[in-house]
Structures are given as structure tokens and as C-alpha cells.
Amino acid sequence: MAATIRDIRNRTGLSLATISKYLNGGNVLPENRKAIAEAIEELHYEVNEVARGLATQKSRTIGVLIQTFDNIFMGSIVSNIERILREHNYGTIVCDCQQDKKLEEEEIHFLLGKRVDGIITIPTAGNAGYLQAAVDRKIPIVLLDRTFTDQKFDSILVDNVEAARGAVQILIDHGHTRIAIICGDDSEYTARERLRGYCTALESANIDIEASYIKRGKLSTAHGYESMKELLAMKDRPSAVFFSNYEITLGGIMAINELHVAFPQEISLIGFDNFMLSKVINPKLWMVNQPMETIAQQAAELMLKRLEESGKKGEDYEPETIILPTDMVEGESIRALS
Amino acid sequence: MAATIRDIRNRTGLSLATISKYLNGGNVLPENRKAIAEAIEELHYEVNEVARGLATQKSRTIGVLIQTFDNIFMGSIVSNIERILREHNYGTIVCDCQQDKKLEEEEIHFLLGKRVDGIITIPTAGNAGYLQAAVDRKIPIVLLDRTFTDQKFDSILVDNVEAARGAVQILIDHGHTRIAIICGDDSEYTARERLRGYCTALESANIDIEASYIKRGKLSTAHGYESMKELLAMKDRPSAVFFSNYEITLGGIMAINELHVAFPQEISLIGFDNFMLSKVINPKLWMVNQPMETIAQQAAELMLKRLEESGKKGEDYEPETIILPTDMVEGESIRALS
DNA sequence: CGCTTTGCGTGAACCGTTTCGCTTAATCCA
DNA sequence: TGGATTAAGCGAAACGGTTCACGCAAAGCG
């Protein structure tokens, strides 16, 4: 149906090699150049990237494998990655493994089948095994938001320990000592890190860590909601709560609203992840804000760098780890205790 | 590097045709079947979908072109489309044209270059011209959320008129007559429709339409914010406001919070688009909720249907338009006037 | 038993590019 | 002037699959 390079040959009388040279910016005589351009115009010719991909062994497509699409965090990440890659003429093929480790491994094979030139992923699994096939293919891999201990990869991380420490420190600075955290369980890399930051802050302020103030569970709205209710029902209830991710923040706020608990009067709060929430919740919520555009941008740029390198001889490279700082969005959800 | 079908031939002594037949589920003797399976296993062979794509003239990849990624609406749409397509072994390549009409047309060509088998898109442009190249290629196209008047396409829409009418009717039922709307300008398909619904509701209740209560502008947080402030500053200010999309709802709420206006005591509100907001805003916001999963699902399924059909003879088909109803999420943000 | 069918396998052409090695003519310079 | 260099073009062989037309043997059948 669509025109091919052969149709252009028939029209111009030039050889395929010359036309290919034209398409790829080689030296072609002005008159031939003109003839080819005209033929392309008239035939509505467009390079068949599939055929080109087969010939060059490069698809100019990057696979982006994420755990879920259902939060703004992901939307922003994918959006920015796509934009930057696209500016360098790479396509982005997305896969959502829906937090399913089995599916996650399948998707890797799916992407490899499509011969993507690289993979950017937010891992779900606890170890790097599922990536082995991609590693064997020697394509660049960039990890986002979490990383592995058993094998080294290019990774873009956020300083979770420091982010959590900082959040708790703010509460301490306001005079709080009975500080709770609602967080993920130990299987989650980010959850472990944030809990560590929480403990660090308390320890360095010589505040005892109270086990019943640590609410581990899934990174879900439901966990935030239930845990907040439990904390509020305690007889020695905390005076401040640190919500350690987006869903948990959402759930926690829902519980507070439902029980008509006034904040910061009755309880002080600080949330995580989503800048937008801080705008819309009243009173304005204190927030630890992740630099999502930067994360995405760094990931895309590191990927582009690796792709460029792999053209050159330098076969193997030393994986880089980039750790980004978070920032604090001030709100009105923390009461100062005298 | 990676193993090919020829490596399998060398190992098994079978012909390429037989191996291909095996890969595509044809009849192969059990012993040969076993031999091929073993070779695949040992060589870590994976079908090169690029080569297959060239041979079959099908990429098993669908292009999804959207206007922006920066709202939950899009995340949910892309997520659900990707999931369903993936279940049928199609990959999803996403492009974000960032509301830029020029870029939008470029992306279409980019996708056509990649030889996608179909395109699902949320149009930005006002007319279908930019899609012409895709139409010429005779690949299925499915439009989401908005459609064109100048040319007919498969479209999945929401009943915007009825959604807006219903929202305003709720306000009327609560005794309101001074009802404002903050909406997009006439260049936006959905904005026109929603404004029409607003007018319909008022007319059928014999309420005069007050021009100063209609705030047209961009579909942005800023427009919602500014317009809300203006409405609040009016001397004959409305008793109720209908926010007609997500960003506007967000901006409106921000203005309300900032000016410490109590709702529903001082003003009644109903928002649009984002179910999550209704959970987290206190008092709970009334909302018109778009059935995002259904929109995405219908789009993906219609696409799959077209892809299947195009295998058969039935060359041309009659475009379908599917109009989905919205639903109402009750809140506490509307005061009943006696 | 001879004829048709069916099951399985094969060689070769093809999909639409890129790229390698080679030719030819023009240009340069000692 | 003539050998070396360079620019531009060409033919043909990849890249890794699918598919068509055909061959052959075993099975089915009146």
C-alpha cells in the first residue's frame, strides 16, 4: 500500500543505496536530492521504521515498565520520560505490570521481543532476577525510585532516608514527641528507607521509639485509612502523624475527615508525594515533595547517554546511582506545642 | 548476538518453514516439536518481532496519542487501554502532544513511521485534517473524549450535555437559581457540550441565563482559581457554582480555601472529573464522575474489533459512536435553600 | 487396488531498509 | 601530464522472520 524506497527508485531512476544515503543525510548531488525530495512528496513516502529497525538492529524504541498507572506520580514520570526520549527521536512503549511479579518478568520478555533499545523500569520484584534476560542482551537498563542490593544497575533514586528524617524533624521542631508513622512493610525498598529516616530523627532527638506508633502495611489508601483510625483510637494517641506515601496520605486524610478530627488542633500531620494534595486540602497540608520531573528527566537522560555510548566501543560501563533530594512544602497542618 | 530461527535450524536440522510453523501454532510432528522446543530453550531464543513485523506487515503495536499526561484522567485511560491491548498481545506506544497541534500532527507521522496497527487518540485539534495520513493508510482510528463534526470516526464519548445538565439540575433541586459555571472556551468540544447542558437545565427550569455567571477560559487550574475569585467578589454573587472539569475544580477549591469561604454555608459547589478529589476534600465535594475505566475499555475493545475485522475482507466499516453516561457522587457541598 | 485426501516438511521468494565493496568521473597537485 | 584522492552512485548481500507452491508418504475409501 504505502510507498517504499523502490517506488522512489522507479520514479527517479536512482539506486536504492543512493536513496538510503539521502534519507540518512549522506552526500547526494543537488539535482538528485531534488528529484528524491519530489518523489517523496508526491508518493507520501515515509520511512518504514520496522524495516529500518531490522536492517540496523536498532528499534529506536525504549520500554518503560512500571508497577501501576493509577497515581499521579506515574503519570508525571512517564510523561516526562516520553517527552525527552521523543525529542531524541525515540518512541516509548509502556507496560504496566500491576504490581505482579510474574507479569513483570513476562513484560521484560515482551519488550525484548519488540527489540527495544533500552528499558527504564520501576521494579516491583525484590531482586534483579527477572531482568536477567535484558542484561544478557546487553541493552541499557535504568532503574527508577528503587534499586537492588544483589546487582548493580543505573539507578535514579530519591533520598528517602533524608526525606523521612526531615519530615519527622519538622514535627520534632514543633515540639512533638509522640510521633507516629504509617508506612509500607519491609518488603518495600522505599518503605524500609523511610522508616529508617523516621527512626534516625527520633534517635538523634533522644525520643524513644514506640512500636505501636509504627503502622506497617500495604502502600494503599485502605492501609492509611485503617491505620489512621487505629492511631486515633489509641488511649495514648500520638500528637503527630507522618504519612509516608501518597496513597497512605490520601487514606489518612479520609479517616480524619470522616471522624471530624480537626487538624492541626487535635493532631498534626505531614504527608508525602503529591504536591497537588497540598493545594486542595484545607488547612493546607505539610508535604514532602518528590522531584518527579527531575527523576524522569535524569532517567531519560541517563538512558540517552547509555544509548549513545553503546554505539562506541566502550562495551561495559560502571552503573551510576543518582540520588536526588526531596523538598518540603510548608502548610498549616502542624501545631506548635509549647 | 541473540539467537535466530537459523540457529534453531542448525540445531534441529529442520527447515525454516517448519520452525516458523511451530512458532505460529501449525502442525508439526511431536518429535520435531520437542526438538524445536529444546533448541529454543537452550539458545534462549525469542521471536524477533521486528523481523516478524516486516514479514507480516503488522507490528502488533497500537499508538496512543494524548494531549497531556498530567492528570489522573489520562493515567487511568492509558493504563486501562494498555492492559487490555496487552492481554491481546499488542504493545502500546504512547505519545503526548502537550496540547500542541503542530506536534500532534508530527506524532501521527511518527506513529505511522513505526507502522502501528491502529491509533487511539484524544484529539487536540479542532478538525480531523491532521489524521489524514493515518486515514489514507486505512488503519483503524478510535477517538476518545471528543470527536469531529467534519468527518466521522469511531468515537467513545461521554454524554457531556447530560452530565452538565444533571449537575445543574441537582443545584436547582436544592433551591438554587443563581448558578454559575466555570468552563472552557468554545474551541473545546467538551466545554461547548457542558455549557449547553448547563443552559438546558436552566431553561427547562425557567431560570434566566445570566451572562456574568458564565466564566469561559482555559481548562486550567489558573482559570478555575481566578474565576472563582471573581465570582466571589461579585456584588450579586451566585449561590452555587458548577466546576466543569478537573483542573477548574482544583483551582476553584484553591480559591475557596485561600479566601476562607465556608462551603456549603456560604456557597454551594459541584465539581467534575475526579473521584479522588471527592474523598479528600472536606466537606465532601459533590462530583460528576466520568467512567474512565469504561471509556478506556470500550476504546480498546473497539480497536481490537477493528483490527480483527481488517483481517477479513470487509474493507470499509461504518464508524461507531459510543456515548457513555456519567454518574453522580453525592457529597456535602450543596446547601438546600428553603 | 487404485484414487483421493490429508499431514508434514521443504526451498525459495519476499517484506523494506542499510551497508559493503566496487566503479567511474572529476579534481588536485607535484 | 599523470597518479592519487575524492565525490557520488550502484549492485547485491544482509537483517530475521513468513508464506507460497510443491513433494512425498501414509491414511481413507468405494
Image: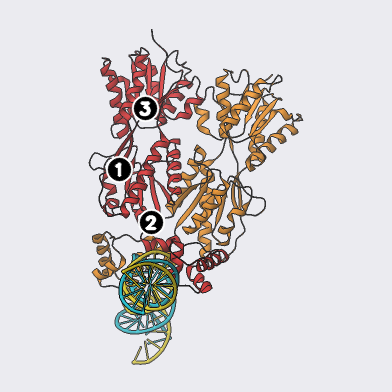
Chain colours: A red, B orange, C yellow, D cyan
Residue B262, above or below A8: above
Chain of the residue under label 3: A
The residue under label 3 is: A244
Label 2: element kind: loop
Q: Quadrant of residue A267?
A: top left
Query: In the shown orientation, is residue B323 left or right of residue A155?
Result: right
Give the amino acid type for the residue marked by disc 2 in the picture.
Lys
Give the amino acid type for the residue marked by disc 1 in the picture.
Asp
- Answer yes or no: is residue B161 visible: no
Are marks 1 and 3 in one subunit?
A: yes
Q: Residue at x 58, y 61 (%)?
A: B136
Give the amino acid type for the residue marked by disc 3 in the picture.
Ser
Q: Position of residue A165 (x, y in %)?
A: 32, 23
The residue under label 1 is: A154
Q: Position of residue A184 (x, y in %)?
A: 33, 30
Query: In the shown orientation, is residue B111 left or right of residue B28?
Result: right
**Along the line of sight, the residue nearer the viewer: A221 or A169:** A169
Sequence-first tag of 2 and 3: 2
Q: Position of residue A188 (x, y in %)?
A: 31, 34
Question: What is the quadrant of the N terminus of chain B in the image?
Answer: bottom left
